[in-house]
Amino acid sequence: MTAPNIDAVFISDLHLNPEQPEITQRFSDFVQWAAENTRALYILGDFFHVWAGDDSLNAWSESIALQLAGLASRGVHVFYMHGNRDFLLGKKFAELSVMKILSDPEVIELNGERVLLTHGDGYCTNDHAHQWLMRITRNRWFSTLFLLIPYGIRKRLVSKVRIYSQTNKQKAASTMDIVAAVMLADMRKHNVSSVIHGHIHKPGLTTHSEKGITYKQYVLSDWDDKPTFLCYYNSCGFSFDIF
């Protein structure tokens, strides 16, 4: 087998759920492609539409985990970052998938360049309701205590995320978007000039200039129709591709 020519691939916001089998099939096709073409896969949150805890594993979600494990068996390093939908995904799923869970944010190095990875919702500071919810749900103690609740009750509570999502769609776009000043402050804090994130479903590259420095913001797409994913090549840098 020839060596993969892509050094890393970045995806997010698949929102996998059994009620949308077309997205699950899209992911399965992508896994087969990734096994042949990349050395590393980074999943930056909202991989699942909802996740009530690792005790929700069933035949459908186990098949997803085993596909990721198949990538690992082919030598592809798989990394995972929690999003606002799947922050309860834990050690059991990670071990079954043979993937490493990253903190949010996380700085990685690509060919000597520091790059900041994050799900992105922390930069949407105009969405006050979401920021309040995020401060609660991303707290380690919340997750520990919440997982003590019987699964049936937990499942009903987590399913309300869908209702919240529908409410979110009615908010003004400016409310749900990234606040550039907040993002740039975080980039300066971590000493990076490039950030990769998802959450807002507006794929593409945006550049920001400040005090003579150019900052690059790579935004990942959702997977509802024709998803794009971000590739990194040691030879030529970043490139968006359509799957």
Image (cartoon, rainbow, N blue to C red):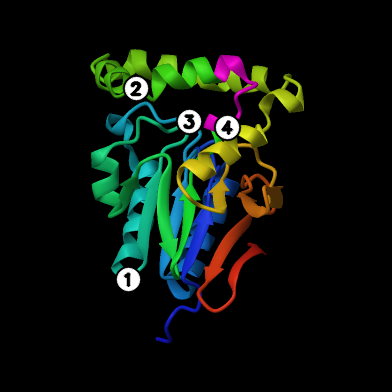
For the record, the magenta segment spans 122-130
**Camera-side residue: 216 or 92?**
216
Instruction: Specify whether residue 160 is in view.
Output: no
Mark 1–mark 4 CB contact (< 8 Å): no
Q: Is residue 47 left or right of residue 23?
A: left
Distance Cα–Cα, label 1 vs label 4:
34 Å
SS at circle 4: helix
SS at circle 2: loop
Residue drawn where x is 52% and y is 48% of the image: 24
SS at circle 3: loop
Q: Is residue 52 left or right of residue 180?
A: left
Residue annotated with mark 2: 139
Please name which of the two marks, 2 or 4, marks the residue nearer to the observer. Answer: 4
Distance Cα–Cα, label 2 vs label 4:
17 Å
Sequence-first tag of 1 and 4: 1
**Camera-side residue: 187 or 147?**
187
Please name which of the two marks, 1 or 4, marks the residue nearer to the observer. Answer: 4
**Camera-side residue: 114 or 168?**
114
Label 1 is placed on what type of residue?
A: Gly
Q: Is residue 128 magenta?
A: yes
Distance Cα–Cα, label 4 vs label 3:
16 Å
Please name which of the two marks, 2 or 1, marks the residue nearer to the observer. Answer: 2
